[in-house]
Amino acid sequence: MDRLTTHDALYNFVTNLVPSLTRTKDDAIILDAFQSNDIRHVCQAIRNAQTNEVKYQHLTLRFGGNSEQSVYSFDLSRQMTFCLDMYSLYLAVKHISFQLEIFHPDMISSLVVPIKAETLNWPLGQAFLQQIFYYHRDALSHITPCVQLHTGNLDQLSLSSNIASLRNKATSLWVDIYTPSEYLDFLEQCTPDAIKVSQPLETKEMKEGLIPIVHFVRKNNIKFIAGRVATQKDLNQFKLLGASYYFGYISDIPRTMQTKTIRLVSNT
């Protein structure tokens, strides 16, 4: 891998991978969005559960004229989702670097960037992360990776090593889990700074599914982040469960994050 010392180099690395990894019809939709330079971040404020003060911005990828289409609503091949994770991280690095040119670091809200656990275990994904750690560490100090442990039967030996590496290099590390989760025992070995759960509280079973997580965060004295909070009732219940921060449509509609556009010029 060449040295990815610039934003252009990060961009070119990811976008040059995408055509070769396009396998399905849905992959082709994402490829077209890439070629149209149409994939962008939307951000949603993450607020302190007690004061409502904005502390972080949660990022996700969308495309379309009004950023209305989530890239995650498609049935994508695994490696295409890995490319999207890398592209999301590139966009976050570029955005923070631009802000650092204008604002004092204390005025910049940290960006929470989701990344699949499988992307960490993918050799190209791991190599890409190492390049960002080495060449873009100033921007990374304002970025919180949020590792998604959403699928079962992951290679926990490789994952443990990769999360430990990420934990040592990132200023802060979150994990995002579903309930019930098979990974709480695993997380005892590499305790994150926060656990994020986007869990509705519509039924008794859904509420009970949060109990082991609440016990875990209290035992390990880490933050509990409630995602996709839609009603005041849910927010009140999450507060009673000890949520430190929350985000969702109850307080903020996702908005497009404005960044400087980079377009490739064809050599032909």
Image (cartoon, grey):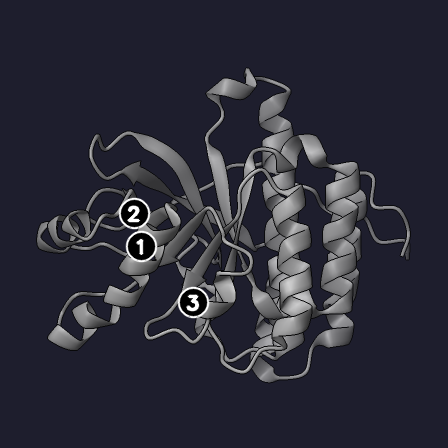
Label for residue 158? none
Please identify, in this view, whether the residue under mark 2 or under mark 3 is nearer the observer: 3
Q: Is 201 situated left or right of 263 in this image?
A: left
Q: Secondary structure at mark 3?
A: helix
**Contact (Cβ within 8 Å) of mark 3 with mark 1:** no
Task: Work out which residue is located at the far front of the displayed protein and give it.
Answer: 219
| Along the line of sight, the residue nearer the viewer: 207 or 118 | 207
Answer with mark 2 or mark 3, whichever residue precedes in sequence.
3
Residue 38: tell me if it is visible.
yes
Q: Position of residue 254 (x, y in %)?
A: 35, 47
Q: Is 166 situated left or right of 179 in this image?
A: right
Answer with mark 3 or mark 1, whichever residue precedes in sequence.
3
**Contact (Cβ within 8 Å) of mark 2 with mark 1:** yes
**Residue under the image location 71 percent in, 69 percent down:** 122
Residue at which label 3 appears? 184
**151 lies above or below 250:** below
